[in-house]
Amino acid sequence: SQQGEEDPQALSIQEGENATMNCSYKTSINNLQWYRQNSGRGLVHLILIRSNEREKHSGRLRVTLDTSKKSSSLLITASRAADTASYFCATVLYNNNDMRFGAGTRLTVKP
Amino acid sequence: GAGVSQSPSNKVTEKGKDVELRCDPISGHTALYWYRQSLGQGLEFLIYFQGNSAPDKSGLPSDRFSAERTGGSVSTLTIQRTQQEDSAVYLCASSLLGEPNLRGRAYTGELFFGEGSRLTVL
């Protein structure tokens, strides 16, 4: 079963705008990770945030985690056409090391 | 190569045939995951191997699906008597455990994915 759910399912923006994607999950986690997927093949890791962290940055990426609301957000600032891809959140559950993925957000950045 | 390698990259088979999909993880990675992704969908967890522990098979959709990991390295996912609904991309990923927490427990860190095996059942 899937643990996380991303919102929105699809997002279309203009180059230069910011893109925000949200992820909600159901059970206690050890960490939450965001991944990017191009063309329906292998996923690439973007960022990992631990359950005791609230915010993390990596280049143009900003991730927040609210464990009380069981939610996370991924912000991509100053988007580029090359950011067009599907973005997935994944959770590592507190009681085991399974990693479960959400259904993803399809981001389209128009030049 | 240094990454996760999957083979075949594409497989077309007839309904009822058995297929084997192979995954070569990154050397030294103790954890190995299999996922299935149907067109335009998210990743469906299938099975998880961690070191010498018993695998977590809770995601396997039916008894036609099985997987093994020999010598803690290469893994094979086998689908018997394939059905059309088995058509999907099968993704393999490997990882190391992260730094132990204050209780001495280590959790999964970054997953490294292969490019997947696209299975088409006619």
Image (cartoon, coloured by chain):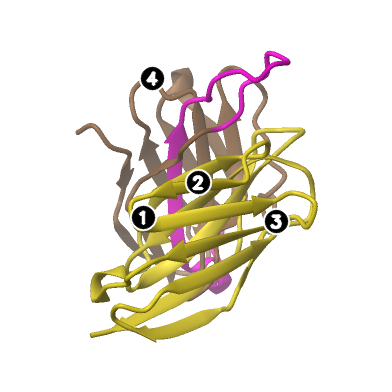
Q: Is residue B57 above or below residue A35?
A: above
CA distance separating discs 4 and 1: 20 Å
**Mark 2 burial class by Cα count in 10 Å: few <14, some 14-19, many 20+:** some
Give the chain coloured yellow.
Answer: A
The residue indicated by pointer 2 is: A56
Q: Which chain is mark 3 on?
A: A
Magenta segment: B80-108
**Mark 3 burial class by Cα count in 10 Å: few <14, some 14-19, many 20+:** some
Disc 2 element: strand
The residue indicated by pointer 4 is: B28
The percent coordinates of residue B76 (x first, y second) are 45, 38
CA distance separating discs 2 and 1: 24 Å
Give the chain coloured brown.
Answer: B
The percent coordinates of residue A97 (x first, y second) are 65, 34
Disc 3 element: loop
Label 1 near label 4: C-beta < 8 Å?
Answer: no
Q: Both on one chain, marks 2 and 3?
A: yes
CA distance separating discs 3 and 4: 28 Å
